[in-house]
Amino acid sequence: MDGFYPARTIASVLKDIENQQLVLPAIQREFVWGEAKICSLFDSLMRGYPIGGFLFWQVSNLTVQNHAFYGFIKNYDQRPPNNLCPRLGEIAASDSRFAILDGQQRLTSLNIGLRGSHTVKLANKWWDNPDAFPKRLLYLDLLASAPDPEESGADEETGDTERYVFRFRTPMQVEVENSHGRRWMPGNHSRLQRQENRSRTVDVTVGELSDGSIEAHDNVVVLDHVHLAGMAA
């Protein structure tokens, strides 16, 4: 439909990010969301909450050739340059390429959580200590009945306590904590459930990684319709 980007699954949108069908214009700010906001986004998706609209701009091949565009962060690292969106070099021609004008923070968070990693400095360690920056993946605690209020991400921006506890952990942390009664499941393999309007739950898969690509079942969480920017390029 003209004027609309079609409803898509999260897995297919992340595939478009990987294939540079979704790109960032130079006017976009850098990624600034912290761990708490990323975890809150995934909790909202699990609960079936709306995650807001997206503003896309369909760009022509000529516009791509004449202007700078950037890719999405996949493996975030607090240390430059991996905390900055990578500038894209030569981009293959496409009739269905869109630049993101509104929604970068949410899409980058999904990309990091489902396809990548999140690395930030540990407290009380020096910046030049390589052990201060463990690479962490997103996990869902399957047994959590309530979040630990002392942990980052325990409350959403609204002040509403999260129902689904997502946290970034190293694989070693997960191994130790699971041996003591926790049940952390990698976020990119999570089989999720969403409550629909008819008060029944359905199994959905946000995204499953296999051989570096994203696969998904037909019955998956879909992004809301997003309006195009209404401009030609």
Image (cartoon, rainbow, N blue to C red):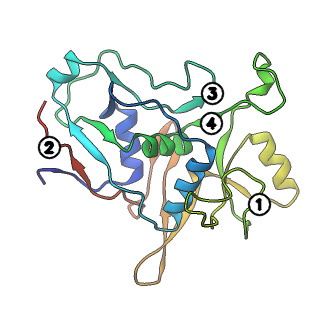
- Residue 192 is labelled as none
| Residue kind at label 2, given as amino acid type | Gly
Q: Amino acid at mark 3?
A: Gln
* Residue 136 sits in quarter: top right
> Of circles 2 and 4, which is in front?
2
Tell me which numbered mark, 2 or 1, is placed earlier along the sequence. Answer: 1
* CA distance separating discs 1 and 3: 25 Å
Do the numbered discs 1 and 3 sit on residues whose CB atoms are within 8 Å?
no
Q: Secondary structure at mark 2?
A: loop
According to the image, label 2 marks what residue?
A: 230
Label 2 or label 3, whichever comes before in sequence order: 3
Earlier residue among tags 1 and 3:
3
Q: How far across and down, in percent of the image, does residue 184 sit?
A: 72, 55
Quarter of the image with the C terminus in it: top left
Residue tagged 1: 148
Quarter of the image where one finds residue 53 = bottom left
Q: CA separation, marks 4 and 1?
A: 20 Å
What residue would you read off at disc 4? 118
Circle 1: residue type: Asp
Q: Give above or below for 189 relative to 144.
A: above
Q: Which residue is tagged 3?
A: 78
Q: Which residue occupies the extreme right position in the image?
A: 180
Callouts 4 and 3 close, C-beta under 8 Å: no
Relative height, residue 76 to residue 161 (above, below): above
